[in-house]
Image: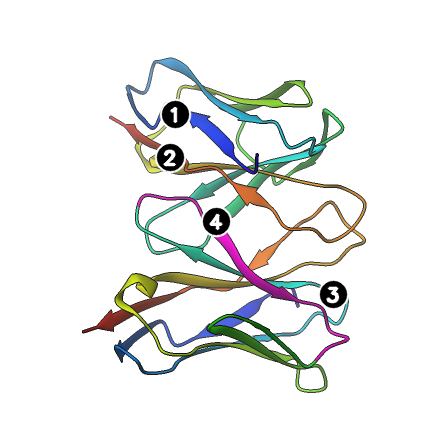
Amino acid sequence: QQQVKQSPQSLIVQKGGISIINCAYENTAFDYFPWYQQFPGKGPALLIAIRPDVSEKKEGRFTISFNKSAKQFSLHIMDSQPGDSATYFCAATNSGGYQKVTFGTGTKLQVIP
Amino acid sequence: DTEVTQTPKHLVMGMTNKKSLKCEQHMGHRAMYWYKQKAKKPPELMFVYSYEKLSINESVPSRFSPECPNSSLLNLHLHALQPEDSALYLCASSWTGGAYEQYFGPGTRLTVT
């Protein structure tokens, strides 16, 4: 029940295209859903996050879509750039605990020129 | 300042050695975390400190010993490690009392020979 399932495992997108990564969760106690971006040899960095009271959040080229009833959320990267090539982790947590974050399995994105 | 620093960046140690990893943040965060990350896997929570007290130990072997000397510092003492403990060790920090972003450091790449 603590799992966050993420797909696809890897993704290749042309420059300027849209990258889409999907996640699904089971634990209805989760109330905060961050996405992390990790470059090789670096620690993860928060990209964008959403709470379940909104269905969409957009920051620049990055958009989270959230479907509470389906317990699914997704990251869309518009106008994908080679600099976006990284591993993306979706995650979920709840505000009742000690910030125990459950990570998805990760998606390695490669944006080719 | 939104930076979490970690030293050393790389560490090679034998199975009989004793070494320590260090982490520092000056954001006023009162929650600090140690994660272990293997290649192509998400970060795996090891320990959580809240207000300098150990709150979560994810059943980590005793050869890993955390320490939180003050609200800005977090150490991980290593002793008698095994080759399978080779990984990227990440430190993170966050506010407490709710679901907040975790800020990750760049990690220490540990190799056990």
Q: Mark 3 near mark 1, Cβ–Cβ under 8 Å?
A: no
Query: Mark 3 — residue?
Result: A31
Tell me the kind of residue under disc 2. Answer: Asp
Tell me the kind of residue under disc 1. Answer: Leu
- Label 3 SS: loop
Question: Looking at the image, which is closer to me, A82 or A22?
Answer: A82
Answer with the quarter of the image where residue A34 lies: bottom right
Q: Is residue A52 magenta?
A: yes
* Identity of the residue drawn at 66% across and 86% down: A70
Q: Nearer the viewer, mark 3 or mark 1?
A: 3
Subunit bearing disc 2? B
Q: Is residue A20 above or below residue B76?
A: below
Q: How far is mark 3 from mark 1, CA to CA?
A: 37 Å
Q: Mark 2 near mark 1, Cβ–Cβ under 8 Å?
A: yes
Query: Mark 2 — residue?
Result: B85
* Identity of the residue drawn at 30% across and 32% down: B83
Sequence-first tag of 2 and 4: 4
Which x, y percent locates residue B66? Answer: 58, 24
Subunit bearing disc 4? B
Query: Mark 1 — residue?
Result: B81
Q: How far is mark 4 from mark 1, CA to CA?
A: 19 Å
Q: How far is mark 3 from mark 2, CA to CA?
A: 32 Å
